[in-house]
Image: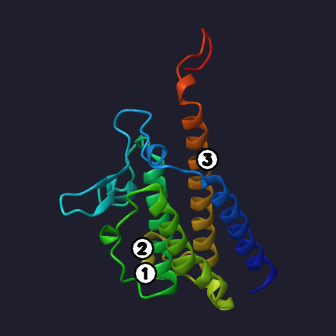
């Protein structure tokens, strides 16, 4: 692993440690909190499995997210983040056989910690450490659809971007939840 690749892996490690600290004390009420009507979350399906609303962000099935994207709960974002690690990791490091619509997402805040640790460590971080030097520069191939011609580095940076964005937005939701009683109490000229 060269210096630039090592730097990318180190950013994942720092971001992961910060994210875990940010999740400390997360409870179920906050995990499922829907500050607006129509928010996407994690729900139990009729077959008893817990699933993410909106097919992980692409309910149309064509790879296009809705516009505008619905507001999402912490539960949804954690489910989506784990599916990102599994989906990209399974195709980059394994055989690509995991069907994401069959992955059970966590039904509680306590279960989310185990889910995140498993999806991040087993499908992404451990394998990233073993990623062969030449694969960082090679195209990832047709298993990645529209990303086929992108390099391994491009794909890893895409996952890093998604991880940082989702973890930051979870942090903002935690801040909003902590101050939820004050939301909408702004004065004239203040944002509600």
Point 81% across, 80% down: residue = 3
Check the image and report above or below for 47 versus 118: above
Front label number (1 vs 3): 3
Furthest residue to the right?
3
Contact (CB < 8 A) between labels 2 and 3? no
Which label was assigned to residue 145? 2
Q: Say which residue appears at 64% left-offset and 76% top-offset.
A: 153
Residue 56, given in percent of the width and then of the height, sits at 38, 58
Separation of residues labelled 1 and 3 (CA atoms): 35 Å
- Position of residue 127 measured from the top left corner of the image (x, y, whole percent): 59, 84
Q: Is residue 22 visible?
A: yes
Q: For the residue carrying disc 2, how many other residues have a C-alpha within 10 Å: few (<14), some (14-19), or many (20+)?
A: few
Q: Are marks 2 and 1 in contact (CB under 8 Å)?
A: yes
User: What is the quadrant of the C terminus in the image?
Assistant: top right
Question: Which numbered disc flags the more N-terminal residue, 2 or 3?
Answer: 2
Percent x, y of residue 6: 76, 79
**Mark nearer the viewer, 2 or 3:** 3
Check disc 2 and report its element: helix, strand or loop.
Answer: helix
Q: Circle 3 is placed at which residue position? A: 171
């Amino acid at each position: 692993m060269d210096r630039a690749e090592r730097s990318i892996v180190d950013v994942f490690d720092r971001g992961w440690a910060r994210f875990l600290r940010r999740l400390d004390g997360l409870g179920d009420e906050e995990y499922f909190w829907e500050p607006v009507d129509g928010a996407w979350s994690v729900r139990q399906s009729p077959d008893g499995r817990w699933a993410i609303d909106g097919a992980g962000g692409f309910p149309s099935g064509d790879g296009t997210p809705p516009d505008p994207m619905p507001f999402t709960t912490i539960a949804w974002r954690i489910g989506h983040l784990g599916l990102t690690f599994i989906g990209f990791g399974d195709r980059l490091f394994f055989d690509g056989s995991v069907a994401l619509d069959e992955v059970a997402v966590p039904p509680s805040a306590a279960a989310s910690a185990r889910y995140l640790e498993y999806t991040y460590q087993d499908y992404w971080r451990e394998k990233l450490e073993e990623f062969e030097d030449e694969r960082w520069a090679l195209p990832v191939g047709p298993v990645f659809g529209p990303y086929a011609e992108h390099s391994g580095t491009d794909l890893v940076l895409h996952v890093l971007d998604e991880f940082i964005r989702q973890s930051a937005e979870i942090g903002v939701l935690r801040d909003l939840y902590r101050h939820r009683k004050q939301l909408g109490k702004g004065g004239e000229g203040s944002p509600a």
